[in-house]
Image (cartoon, rainbow, N blue to C red):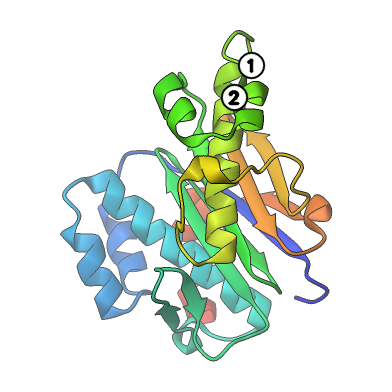
């Protein structure tokens, strides 16, 4: 991947776990990840975490033309994941109920996804800048969608810079930031923040069955 091109992969998920496929995919992640996944209380959290990591590993393996076993993740002091020993490919993952999204880029990248539901006015007033609140405009029919546009833009930006929250969320605005692209997909809002060429980012959809049926002999 070159020229700061960014790729976005969207994957819808069901709540149900196919035990056979789950155990099969669990073999593709390191022991540390397995322990964390199995430690979640709810099945959907287990599934979202496992499918997120396998999706990332699959796409990274294809991008770098390496086997899954050659991919090792590092987590920095702020919790942002990196590919150990690789400076040419960056990635970021986000998941919400029933969906996972992944961003790959040759430069630092951040991504966030949220399902469009009823917006929380108190959250907006507490965390959004004045111009962001003006954009949400709780009097308009698009207020819920706009609320999650701003929320995901802030999250994507923070994950992009990778330094954690250094002040109140209302202290900065994402309005007009050309590094951020926001997309509506199947009832979800996705925002991705990257250094360059974000407007031309490639977007694709992968079904969970694609991962469940991944060819292990090739992937490993």
Q: Is residue 188 above or below residue 206?
A: above
Residue 215: x and y, percent? 51, 71
Q: Is residue 53 above or below residue 220?
A: above
Element type where label 2 sits in the image: helix
Q: Front-most of 204 and 169?
A: 169
Q: Is residue 206 above or below residue 164?
A: above
- Mark 1 to mark 2: distance in Å? 5 Å
Q: Residues within 10 Å of mark 2 (few under 14, many from 20)?
A: many
Which residue is identified by label 1? 142
Q: Residues within 10 Å of mark 1 (few under 14, many from 20)?
A: few
Question: Who's the residue at 72% across and 46% down the image?
Answer: 181
In the image: residue 56, left or right of residue 176: left
Residue 214, can we see it? no
The answer to which quarter of the image holds residue 26 is: bottom left
Residue 20: x and y, percent? 28, 58
Residue 87: x and y, percent? 63, 85
Which residue is identified by label 2? 145
Mark 1–mark 2 CB contact (< 8 Å): yes
* Viewport quadrant of the N terminus: bottom right
Question: Who's the residue at 53% across and 85% down the image?
Answer: 67
Element type where label 1 sits in the image: loop
In the image: residue 144, left or right of residue 34: right
How many circles with numbers are drawn on the protein? 2
Question: Who's the residue at 33% across and 39% down the image?
Answer: 15
């Amino acid at each position: 991947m070159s020229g700061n091109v960014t790729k976005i992969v969207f994957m819808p998920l069901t709540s149900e776990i196919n035990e056979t496929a789950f155990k099969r995919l669990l073999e593709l992640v390191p022991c540390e990840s397995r322990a964390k996944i199995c430690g979640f209380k709810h099945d959907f959290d287990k599934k979202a975490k496992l499918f997120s990591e396998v999706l990332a590993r699959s796409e990274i393996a294809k991008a770098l033309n390496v086997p899954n076993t050659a991919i090792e993740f590092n987590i920095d002091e702020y919790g942002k994941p990196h590919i150990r020993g690789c400076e040419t490919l960056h990635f970021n993952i986000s998941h919400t109920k029933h969906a996972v999204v992944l961003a790959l880029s040759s430069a630092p990248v951040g991504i966030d996804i949220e399902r469009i539901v009823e917006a929380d006015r108190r959250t907006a007033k507490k965390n959004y800048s004045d111009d962001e609140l003006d954009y949400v405009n709780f009097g308009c029919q698009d207020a819920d969608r706009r609320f999650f546009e701003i929320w995901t833009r802030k999250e994507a930006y923070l994950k992009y810079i990778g330094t954690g929250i250094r002040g109140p969320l209302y202290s900065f605005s994402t309005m007009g930031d050309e590094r951020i692209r926001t997309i509506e997909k199947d009832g979800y809002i996705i925002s991705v923040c990257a250094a360059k060429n974000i407007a031309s980012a490639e977007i694709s959809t992968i079904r969970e069955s694609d991962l469940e049926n991944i060819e292990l002999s090739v992937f490993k």
